[in-house]
């Protein structure tokens, strides 16, 4: 039997006090506005960042970047070389709450599968993951470019608490007992989270990926359009490729080995020492990414890597769409089936 | 910066952190060509031909290197001086410390070669990765095979690696009729080569007894592997009896960094050795 979650409602006035208690135990990461930081003049940028009050949190719009950096930082020191020895420097990680939509919660299940369940366990990811609690925020209606319903990531019950912003305050459903002490003791009835049931667009996910599709002409078009900037992978909540760099500071004695985000869409990702490269054309790189998202990852882990958040479509400067690409792949498969 | 690296040893490394390397002393260095040297390291692992280690120098970086020899004193790595990390390694001397993680990846399925005809086709410095297999059969377990053929091709006479080993393998051929070693060069501008000249691919059909019962190992540059597979299949070698060893860019060696992924496989943890039935589906 599942426990009935504790339900609470508090006003904007009380919110400050609630946040105060929460932030004593947790670092809180949520969507925040960055005025003037947008792509175009006088536009803002919505990102995941640490917040200092509930007011700062943007509940209703999609962020430009995902929250993956909370678990997998953009740059991360693995260890230092100092005083003739190698030392692990990753200190204590503070308990963290992340405000996530359903698709982004599914994205964490994807990165969990990759970092924790595939052979070796990644110690740096694990350390952060163990300290994270998820607060669900709902989508009242489907946002621009979303196609979560197609991937079945529109619903989830994988969260510690659910929080809704209402006209005069906030409503919370708490599933995780540990969190109860952080909230006032007023029992209310809070409606269950609403999930999006329909997006403006939908696509079916190809069941199989025959390698003959790799030879199709659609990839040539992408070679002409894609500029290999890597925005799609940087904004993606499930892209986790990284490179490793050694840093030698000026004093020459202490140094460190870091990992930093990398992208299969950017030049030299697969370049070998000796100058042999395996994917040079942009179309091939795009095909490599798209098939990982919709087929290859599922073959390995049983779940789709793409969660249909549509961020790659939002950010592409060449207006290349993951969604359209999946549609095109479906068309090729259908045409081939029709031709026998 | 001093070229001797931190002489740190013996401190226990947290066993659960897969990214922390272990210090290993360089015991000796052998120079084959100006850019290909073998380093014997004080780092002992189980003999599993085909696997690789991640080698690193603090302040410089890390790179995957296949194990070219399993000796009582430690592992031998044959390194080609073509990258940032390797060019620093070439400045080291015996007694210096190098950092190692691993071994990682799978190994050649020796159990599947038992009592069979094994053909090893290798191009250039890839000989380093398959040398432990050849030595395993020549020095330790020759009775385990029906027959061993090695076809090794190099660009030119001055690119020939492991001359000493090749000589002694050939000697064992004199004493054992079931071993045949063929060394070829693609071209010989200086007329310095007494052996065969031509691409390895063109010698495949002349291998004695090649056919549907042959087991083949293929390792080398991508184009050479592609052409050799076609030739092997034309000689009726079965797809499932061909094994290829892949080389890819790697940053972690443990299936996390994503650089070596091909479709649903990671070369570092699912490979580097793949049977052709798997490999033919692996389009980069």
Image (cartoon, coloured by chain):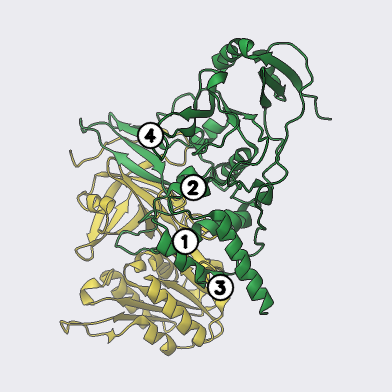
| Local SS, label 3 | helix
- Label 3 – label 4 distance at C-alpha: 44 Å
- Label 2 – label 4 distance at C-alpha: 17 Å
Q: Residues within 10 Å of mark 2 (few under 14, many from 20)?
A: many
Identify the chain of the residue marked 4, using the numbered disc in the image. Answer: A
- Label 1 – label 3 distance at C-alpha: 24 Å
Q: Residue at x 35, y 65 (%)?
A: B128
Identify the chain of the residue marked 1, using the numbered disc in the image. Answer: B
Which residue does the numbered mark 1 point to in the structure image? B272
Could you tell me residue B225's position as x and y percent? 42, 74
Q: Residues within 10 Å of mark 3 (few under 14, many from 20)?
A: few
Q: Residue at x 58, y 12 (%)?
A: A16
Specify whether residue B265 is in view: yes
**For residue A2, side relative to residue B276 (left or right):** right
Which residue does the numbered mark 2 point to in the structure image? B256
| Local SS, label 2 | loop
Could you tell me residue A226's position as x and y percent? 42, 58
**For residue B30, side relative to residue A224 (left or right):** left
Q: Are marks 1 and 2 on the same chain?
A: yes
Quadrant including the N terminus of chain B: top left
Which one is earlier in the sequence, the residue at label 3 or at label 4?
Answer: 4
Q: Is residue B145 above or below residue B54?
A: below
The colour applied to the residues of chain B in this rendering is yellow
Which residue does the numbered mark 4 point to in the structure image? A79
Q: Are marks 2 and 4 on the same chain?
A: no
């Amino acid at each position: 039997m599942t426990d009935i979650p504790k339900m609470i409602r508090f006003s904007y006035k009380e919110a400050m006090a609630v946040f105060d208690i929460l932030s004593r135990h947790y670092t809180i990461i949520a969507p925040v506005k960055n005025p003037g930081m947008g792509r175009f003049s006088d536009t803002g940028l919505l990102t995941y960042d640490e917040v200092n009050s509930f007011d700062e949190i943007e509940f209703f719009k999609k962020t430009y970047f995902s929250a993956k950096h909370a678990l997998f930082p953009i740059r991360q020191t693995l260890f230092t070389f100092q005083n003739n020895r190698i030392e692990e420097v990753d200190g204590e990680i503070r308990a963290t709450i992340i405000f996530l939509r359903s698709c982004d919660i599914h994205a964490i299940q994807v990165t969990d599968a990759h970092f924790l369940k595939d052979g070796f366990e990644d110690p740096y990811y694990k350390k952060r993951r163990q300290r994270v609690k998820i607060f669900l925020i709902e989508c009242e209606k489907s946002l621009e470019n979303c196609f979560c319903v197609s991937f079945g990531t529109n619903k989830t019950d994988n969260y510690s608490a659910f929080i809704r912003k209402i006209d005069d305050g906030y409503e919370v459903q708490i599933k995780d007992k540990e969190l109860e002490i952080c909230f006032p003791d007023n029992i209310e009835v809070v409606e269950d989270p609403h999930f999006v049931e329909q997006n403006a667009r939908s696509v079916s996910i190809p069941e199989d990926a025959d390698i003959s599709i790799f030879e199709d002409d659609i990839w040539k078009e992408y070679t002409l359009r894609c500029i290999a900037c890597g925005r799609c992978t940087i904004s993606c909540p499930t892209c986790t490729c990284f490179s490793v760099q050694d840093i030698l500071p000026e004093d020459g004695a202490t140094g460190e080995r870091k990992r930093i985000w990398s992208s299969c869409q950017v030049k030299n990702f697969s370049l070998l020492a000796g100058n042999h490269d395996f994917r040079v054309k942009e179309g091939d790189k795009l095909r490599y990414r798209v098939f990982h998202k919709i087929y290859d990852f599922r073959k390995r882990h049983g779940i789709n890597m793409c969660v249909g958040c549509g961020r790659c479509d939002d950010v592409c400067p060449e207006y290349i769409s993951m969604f359209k690409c999946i549609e095109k792949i479906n068309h090729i498969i259908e045409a081939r089936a029709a031709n026998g | 910066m001093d070229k001797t690296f931190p002489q740190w040893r013996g401190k226990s490394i947290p066993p659960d952190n897969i990214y922390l390397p272990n210090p290993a002393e360089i015991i000796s260095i052998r120079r084959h060509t100006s850019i290909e040297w073998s380093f014997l390291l004080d780092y002992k692992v189980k003999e599993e031909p085909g696997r690789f280690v991640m080698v690193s120098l603090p302040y410089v970086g890390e790179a995957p290197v296949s194990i070219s020899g399993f000796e009582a004193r430690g592992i031998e790595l044959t390194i080609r001086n073509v990258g940032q990390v390797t060019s620093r390694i070439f400045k080291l001397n015996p007694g210096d410390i190098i950092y190692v993680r691993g071994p990682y990846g799978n190994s050649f399925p020796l159990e599947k070669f038992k009592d069979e005809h094994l053909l090893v086709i290798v191009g250039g410095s890839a000989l380093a990765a398959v040398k432990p297999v050849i030595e395993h059969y020549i020095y330790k377990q020759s009775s385990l095979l029906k027959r061993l053929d090695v076809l090794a091709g190099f660009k030119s006479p001055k690119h020939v690696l492991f001359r000493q080993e090749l000589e002694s393998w050939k000697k064992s051929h004199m004493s054992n009729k079931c071993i045949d070693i063929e060394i070829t060069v693609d071209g010989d501008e200086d007329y310095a080569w007494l052996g065969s000249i031509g691409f390895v691919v063109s010698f495949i059909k002349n291998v004695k007894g090649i056919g549907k019962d042959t087991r083949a190992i293929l390792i080398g540059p991508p184009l050479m592997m592609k052409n050799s597979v076609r030739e092997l299949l034309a000689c009726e070698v079965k797809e499932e009896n061909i094994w290829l060893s892949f080389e890819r860019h790697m940053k972690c060696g443990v299936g996390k960094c994503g650089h070596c992924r091909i479709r649903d496989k990671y070369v570092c943890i699912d490979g580097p050795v793949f049977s052709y039935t798997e490999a033919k589906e692996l389009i980069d």
